Image (cartoon, grey):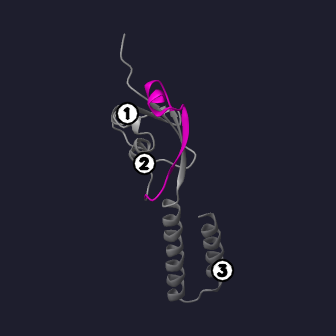
Amino acid sequence: PIEVNRVHRLLIRSCTGSCAHLRERRLLQEVISRQHTMAASASATSPITVRVLFFAAAREMAGTGGAEVELSGADAHTTAELRTRIAELYPGTADVIPSITLALNQEYLSHGEEATLNDGDEVALIPPISGG
């Protein structure tokens, strides 16, 4: 996306002084629009890596305190996708995944709330705690 933005600025600068015809300007805008669409599409489908932290019973079920989980193939990576991937990678967690509380980058998500994930995000899995 950064490269596309630089090309966009260069083309606009050259166009403002030298493009005499409206048709040429429209053509240039179409090219720029396609470049932005292609860049957004490429970055949206790129795999991301999320740091997952397992707490309490989730740690015991997963057999680890933390892991790097890669998500790929989606237009936008979400916490729902992450829950599914964790259940695949750590089958012992499958039963509690739906009721587990998530914290995204140290901010709790409300029960049932879904969030979009980015490369490098940290997600903590905090299972329900019983007792008094």
Q: What stretch is highlighted in magenta?
A: 54-74
Q: How crowded is mark 2: few (under 14 residues within 10 Å), some or many (20 or more)?
A: some
Q: Distance between the residues labelled 3 and 2?
A: 40 Å
Q: Mark 1 highlights which residue?
A: 110
Q: Which of marks 1 and 3 is in front?
A: 1
Q: Element under label 1?
A: loop
Q: Where is residue 50 in the image (x, y as percent from the top left)?
A: 53, 45
Q: Residues within 10 Å of mark 3 (few under 14, many from 20)?
A: few
Pick the residue in front: 8 or 116.
Answer: 116
Note whether 89 is above or below 38 in the view shown: above
Q: Which of marks 1 and 2 is in front?
A: 2
Q: Distance between the residues labelled 1 and 3?
A: 50 Å
Which numbered circle lies on residue 21?
A: none
Q: Element under label 3?
A: helix
Among the two numbered marks 1 and 2 on one chain, the one whose residue lies closer to the N terminus: 2
- Asked where in the image residue 65 lies, by quadrant, the reply is top right
Q: Position of residue 25 (x, y in %)?
A: 54, 83
**Residue at the spot x=42%, y=48% of the render?**
78
Q: Mark 3 highlights which residue?
A: 14
The answer to if 128 sits in the magenta stretch is: no
Q: Mark 2 highlights which residue?
A: 78
Which quarter of the image is occupied by the N terminus?
bottom right
Among the two numbered marks 3 and 2 on one chain, the one whose residue lies closer to the N terminus: 3
Q: Distance between the residues labelled 1 and 2?
A: 14 Å
Image-based side of 12 in relation to 90, left or right: right
Which kind of residue does numbered mark 2 sit on? Answer: Thr
**Residue at the spot x=38%, y=43% of the render?**
114
Image-based side of 121 in relation to 132, left or right: right
The answer to if 57 sits in the magenta stretch is: yes
Pick the residue in front: 86 or 92.
Answer: 92
Which kind of residue does numbered mark 3 sit on? Answer: Ser
